[in-house]
Image: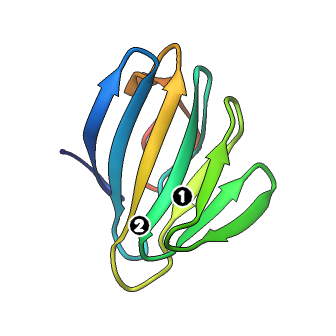
C-alpha cells in the first residue's frame, strides 16, 4: 500500500500489460488533474461515489458503475462525500510506471 495526499492505493495484481489497484480516496480529497502517455484506465466504484473530470465533462460514478479513461485524456478523481470512497482501477498499456503521470494541476503542489 502506498499513501498519497488524497488517500492510498494497493496493487492487487500486475503482469505484462496490465495492473490492478484498489484506490481509497479520503473524504473531500481528489487526485491531480492529469493524463497518461502510455496507459488507459478503467475505474469501478465499489464504495461511495466518485466525481470524475474526463476531458471537458464532469460525471458522477456510483457503486457498481465504471468509467473508461483513454490514453492521453485529461482526468481527475474526486470524493465530495463525507466518507472514504473506494474503487478498483485497471490499467492497461505498454508502460505502467507511476512516472507516466503528467500533472496539469495539483492542489498538493506536486509536479
Using residue 42 as the reference point, say whether residue 89 is left or right of it: left
Q: Nearer the viewer, residue 104 or 37?
A: 37
The correct choice, above or below, for 75 with respect to 101 in the image is below
Residue 51 at x, y percent in the picture: 59, 69
Q: Residue at 59%, 58% (x, y): give it.
A: 66
SS under mark 2: strand
Whether residue 31 is visible to the viewer of this picture, yes or no, is: yes
Can residue 29 be seen in this snapshot? no
| Residue position for label 1 | 77
Within-10-Å neighbours for mark 1: few <14, some 14–19, many 20+: many
Disc nearest the viewer among 2 and 1: 2
**On the image, which quarter does residue 70 sit in?**
top right
- What residue do we see at 36% from left, 59% from top? 6
What residue is at 32 percent from the left and 55 percent from the top? Answer: 5
Residue 15 marker: none
Q: Residue furthest right?
A: 56
Alpha carbons under labels 2 and 1: distance apart:
14 Å
Amino acid at each position: 500500500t502506498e499513501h498519497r495526499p488524497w488517500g492510498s492505493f494497493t496493487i492487487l495484481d500486475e503482469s505484462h500489460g496490465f495492473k490492478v489497484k484498489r484506490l481509497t480516496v479520503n473524504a473531500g480529497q481528489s487526485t491531480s488533474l492529469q493524463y497518461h502517455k502510455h496507459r488507459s484506465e478503467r475505474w469501478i466504484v465499489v464504495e461511495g461515489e466518485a466525481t470524475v473530470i474526463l476531458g471537458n465533462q464532469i460525471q458522477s460514478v456510483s457503486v457498481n458503475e465504471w468509467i473508461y479513461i483513454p490514453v492521453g485524456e485529461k482526468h481527475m478523481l474526486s470524493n465530495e462525500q463525507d466518507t472514504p470512497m473506494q474503487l478498483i482501477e485497471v490499467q492497461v498499456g505498454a508502460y505502467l510506471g507511476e512516472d507516466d503521470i503528467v500533472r496539469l494541476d495539483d492542489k498538493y503542489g506536486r509536479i
